Amino acid sequence: MKTPDAAIVPVVDLTATASIPEVEVPDSTPETLTETLHEQVARELKKVDGKSSFPFLLEIGTEEIPDWMIPTALENLRLSFEKLEIPHESVRLDATPRRLVLRAEGLPGRQPDSVERVLGPPKSAPPQAVAGFARKQGIQPSEMKVESTPKGEYYTYLKKVAGRNIKDILAEALPGVILGLYFPKTMYWTGKGGPRFIRPIRWIVALLGEEIVPFELAGVRSGRLSSGHRRLGAREIAVTTMDYERRLGDHGVVLSAEERRNRIRIGMKGIRIKPDDKLLETLVYLTECPMPIQGGFDAQFLELPEEVLITVMRHHQKYFSVEDSEGKLAPAFVAVMNIASDPEGFVRRGNERVLRARFNDARFFWETDQKKAFAGRKLDLANVTFQAKLGSYLAKTERMMQLAGELGGDAHAVRAAELSKIDLTTELVKEFTELQGVVGGLYARVQGESEPVWQAIYDQYKPESMEDAIPRNRTAQIVALADKLDTLRGCFGVGLIPTGSRDPFALRRAAQGVVRILIEGRFDLSLLAFLGGDEALKAFFAERVRYYFKDIRGFAYDEINACMAASVGWGNLVDLGTRLERVRGLRASPDFEPLAAAFKRIANILEQSRGTGFTALPSGVDEALLEAGPEHELYQEFGRIAGQPIENAIARLRPKIDLFFDKVLVNAPDPAVRQNRLTLLQTLLAEFSTIADFSEIVTNS
């Protein structure tokens, strides 16, 4: 007997509704049908704490989503689902360019019933009011009881609230979950004023167990129909929570990003590619069925600078570059197709043809740009706008030249700053914007500029990320600082301050670059001296400094707060790093926390005293007013350790301070004695506040 393509088989649903859904089992033979039903029944009968639990599947099918937005969208999807507070055992997220997928295990079919205490009228209310309230609640007055509350005695009763079906909760919440996903940009596709999403939504799969979670979004109704690979699969595929990933695989979609990543790596085994993890991640989220292929190009193109060739391959074509046995660029590349094979070589030859055209363009622009002296292009920068309120790149160049000198740069640094933006006027950078800076450095080298100058132009945008290195030499570091500081000062000066996730001028990255260059380049200068007195910019940098030392260098937040609050300030970031190392080292001492607690107590006492008009004695502590015993001993010990490193003083000072607070009344009745004691504490605090404000240290006491 021939089995139909799709058999409809009843399966018992153990939710509280006791409904009997119909489950579609596609493309089954009698043997596989029996096996599939056994698997499904086993899953449906799974018990958690004696109650039925179910898998949940949500697939949002769209037009192709930009690859770099997908990981953030998945994390948003996870957080939004967790906020629904629906019990579950685990969550798994997957994505391809055309789908965002959340799968969860162990959801209950229904919320448990609950009891809610309802507050009625006060005990003093007349009987008619009590009876009226009871009627309104559908109960008898005798079902209420009197309880004491913060407001007094009131009638209350326990109201039973029936739990809702999880399917209903999901149906109500999922449209908001989907439309609430964050994307840097979104679009309308059903008309102005309609829902917004990164790309048009084409299908939605939403299943709890084997039941559809019903809702509609932008004219798309949820169901059990997914879609396969554009070329290798069917447009509509019926899926269940159990066979979802397998069914997609049958239709050309590799759902797991990790599996796609491994496919690409395995496909490139034996080829000496230039490692490029960022490109790999891009290709993972650009494909649903990745397959690497190797192609080649004419070796004559190797006469162009390697940087130009790699940029064309990487940024414009998404190709991996290939090295020869000596580590030099080879006339070959690896592309990643979105289909399983290329037996006739059509895809390979097509990629080679496109790359050849791009390389010809690059060679034409390179040769054309060389016909004009590089430095002779400087005045052309007057026609290139940096920012509407901040003028042209020529004006920015003049500011950078001045800043380079102020930062301690020599003639090489000033010259590099003068030439740094000229490549923005070249044809090669206009065509390949990713090469700005690099092209300027290459042109400067070819046209005879000194090594420090061309290298500084080449490196001026570094570091471009936390993983990127800072510029290679002092001249390059100064030019990079001048560029970033000028951008930050200018943008903050005209109110272009980053808010939330909006940072169109990448000011956070620029500020983080300044912090890294100053610290890792060992610049012995104050950052604050170059901020033009802008308090908003100072606060902005303070956040970046805290981030660097906490998240990159691993210092505790209270150590950072303490050292930044020191009397010497935090402008010299090299000095700040040194002091942080000292405080972290001190923290291992058993005397550190008690001493920090004592400094906190001193700071509080002095703060309160200033409120009553205290100022330290200009002549310092009057020894004649000191009381014999703990007070005088503390003063003497302080005199012996003054000027010594705190590492040597901490163990000797701690017992003297402890005894002082145990035996001495700071706020003595005699005003002169009180002021003298406060002056002693002020002097003691000031001695160590050049390292850190130890009152900021969090202690257990």
Image (tube, rainbow, N blue to C red):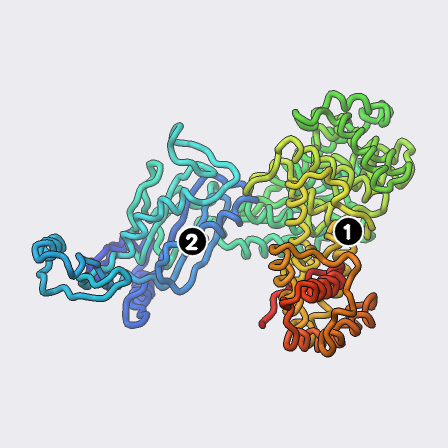
Is 194 on the left or on the right of 72, as rendered? left
Is 633 on the left or on the right of 125, as rendered? right
Front of the two marks 2 and 1:
1
Q: Which residue is mark 2?
A: 102
- Residue 9: image location, x then y, percent: 24, 58
Is 78 on the left or on the right of 554, as rendered? left
The three-letter amino acid code for the residue at tag 1 is Asn
- Residue 356: image location, x then y, percent: 71, 33
Mark 1 element type: loop
Q: Is residue 480 above or below residue 11?
A: above
| Numbered label attached to residue 572 | 1
Q: Is residue 570 above or below residue 689?
A: above
Is 553 on the left or on the right of 247, as rendered? right
Mark 2 element type: strand
In depth, the one of 120 and 427 nearer the eye is: 120
Q: Whole-Å distance between the Cαs marked 2 and 1?
A: 48 Å
Q: Is residue 12 above or below residue 323?
A: below
Residue 261, picture quadrant: bottom right
Label 1 crowding class (10 Å Cα cut-off): few <14, some 14-19, many 20+? Answer: some
Residue 128, picture quadrant: bottom left
| Viewer can see residue 298 | no
Disc on the earlier residue, 2 or 1: 2
Quadrant where the N terminus is found in the figure = bottom left
Q: Is residue 524 above or below residue 531?
A: below
Residue 387, picture quadrant: top right
The three-letter amino acid code for the residue at tag 2 is Leu
| Viewer can see residue 160 | yes
In depth, the one of 120 and 71 nearer the eye is: 120
Q: Residue at horizontal 41%, vertical 39%?
A: 201
Quadrant where the C terminus is found in the figure = bottom right
